[in-house]
């Protein structure tokens, strides 16, 4: 099995199309098809279901994809490690982050990183914390800034704590809760209309868990995928929101109330990374910039 076969396989799986994958890889379509056939012969099983419009993975192909991505990520990390030993940090930094993550100014951090390591290509994507954890574990991201909602440490993934804070209730200034002006419990919020994020987001998972633990059923009538829309909806008095405490500074017109009977450090920001031996030099360098710690080749 050759690395180029795995590279070709991953490209076709991502594009779900031989022609587009061949164009991206800058190889001939016939050469790409021959490479996939060679891989299928070696594994003695079809990897794709081919139609005139697209290709999809077979069960065997899905099983291979995660392993192929991890192998390619490890090879890339090996090349970058050798370059780092020679005093040059180059290659690519693939970073993921959830929106408005506490304790991390992603734009400023990446600007500082680019200024120090101009030969490293930066790729950034936003997603929910659950998806980001999967991407790091699969080797598709070098690291991600996310919210810890469960024990993240596994053979493929570790969580480095960054900061923690409580959850807060945001409501319109004319809402009954704002008029009362007191801290509230999940029980006090029964029957309210909620604005919240997609279930993949860290704050949503934390809130769902807190209300489930309190035995309070809640209805998320307005589900959004960005912070500003959530704040706009609450600002129009269409519902209330339970969010990390630092969100209260984003909209001064809203009333923020402490949420009692919940963990004071429920919202914990973490950096998700592969195991130390699999962490890329670029990821270690970014973590060193973030924490102010000296950079070490074997850990982050």
Image: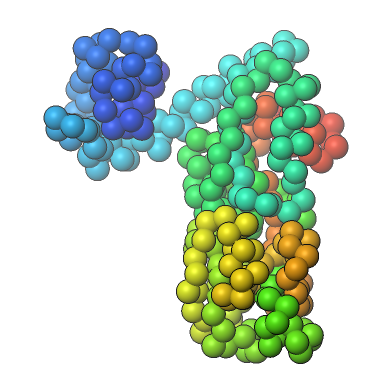
In the rendered image, the vertical position of residue 137 relative to residue 241, given as above or below = above
Question: What residue appears at the point 50 percent right and 35 percent down from the top-left corner?
Answer: 140
Quarter-wise, where is residue 290 in the image? top right
Question: What residue appears at the point 21 percent right and 12 percent down from the top-left corner?
Answer: 30
Q: Position of residue 162 (x, y in %)?
A: 76, 51
Q: Nearer the viewer, residue 275 or 162?
A: 162
Q: Nearer the viewer, residue 194 or 295?
A: 194
Q: Position of residue 268 (x, y in %)?
A: 70, 59
Q: Position of residue 52 (x, y in %)?
A: 14, 30
In the rendered image, the vertical position of residue 106 relative to residue 12, given as above or below = below
Q: Nearer the viewer, residue 98 or 13?
A: 98
Residue 117 visible here:
yes
Relative to 68, 96 lies left or right: right
Q: Position of residue 231 (x, y in %)?
A: 64, 64
Question: What residue appears at the point 78 percent right and 29 percent down from the top-left corner?
Answer: 112
Relative to 191, 57 lies left or right: left
| The N terminus - image quarter | top left
Quarter-wise, where is residue 168 in the image? bottom right
Question: What residue appears at the point 61 percent right and 22 percent down from the top-left corner?
Answer: 121
Quarter-wise, where is residue 36 in the image? top left
In the rendered image, the vertical position of residue 260 relative to residue 228, given as above or below = below
| The C terminus - image quarter | top right
Check the image and name the residue furthest to the left: 52
């Amino acid at each position: 099995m050759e690395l180029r076969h795995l590279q070709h396989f991953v490209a076709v799986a991502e594009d779900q199309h031989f022609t587009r994958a061949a164009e991206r890889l800058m190889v001939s379509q016939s050469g790409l098809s021959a490479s996939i056939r060679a891989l299928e012969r070696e594994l003695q099983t079809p990897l794709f279901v081919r139609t005139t419009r697209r290709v999809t993975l077979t069960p065997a192909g899905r099983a291979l994809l995660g392993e192929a991505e991890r192998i390619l990520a490890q090879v890339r990390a090996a090349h970058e490690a050798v370059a780092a030993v020679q005093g040059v940090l180059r290659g690519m930094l693939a970073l993921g982050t959830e929106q408005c993550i506490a304790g991390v100014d992603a734009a400023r951090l990446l600007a500082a990183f680019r200024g120090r390591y101009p030969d490293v290509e930066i790729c950034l994507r936003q997603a929910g914390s659950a998806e980001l954890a999967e991407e790091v574990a699969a080797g598709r991201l070098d690291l991600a800034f996310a919210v810890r909602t469960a024990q993240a440490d596994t053979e493929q993934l570790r969580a480095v704590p960054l900061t923690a804070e409580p959850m807060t209730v945001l409501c319109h200034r004319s809402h009954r809760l704002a008029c009362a002006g007191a801290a509230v419990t999940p029980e006090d919020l029964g029957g309210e209309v909620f604005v919240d994020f997609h279930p993949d987001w860290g704050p949503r998972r934390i809130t769902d868990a807190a209300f489930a633990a309190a035995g309070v059923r809640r209805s998320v009538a307005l589900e959004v995928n960005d912070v500003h829309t959530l704040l706009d909806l609450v600002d129009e008095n269409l519902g209330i929101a339970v969010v990390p405490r630092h969100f209260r500074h984003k909209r001064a017109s809203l009333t923020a109330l402490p949420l009692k009977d919940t963990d004071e450090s429920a919202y914990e920001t973490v950096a998700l990374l592969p195991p130390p031996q699999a962490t890329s030099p670029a990821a270690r360098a970014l973590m060193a910039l973030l924490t102010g710690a000296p950079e070490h080749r074997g850990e982050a």
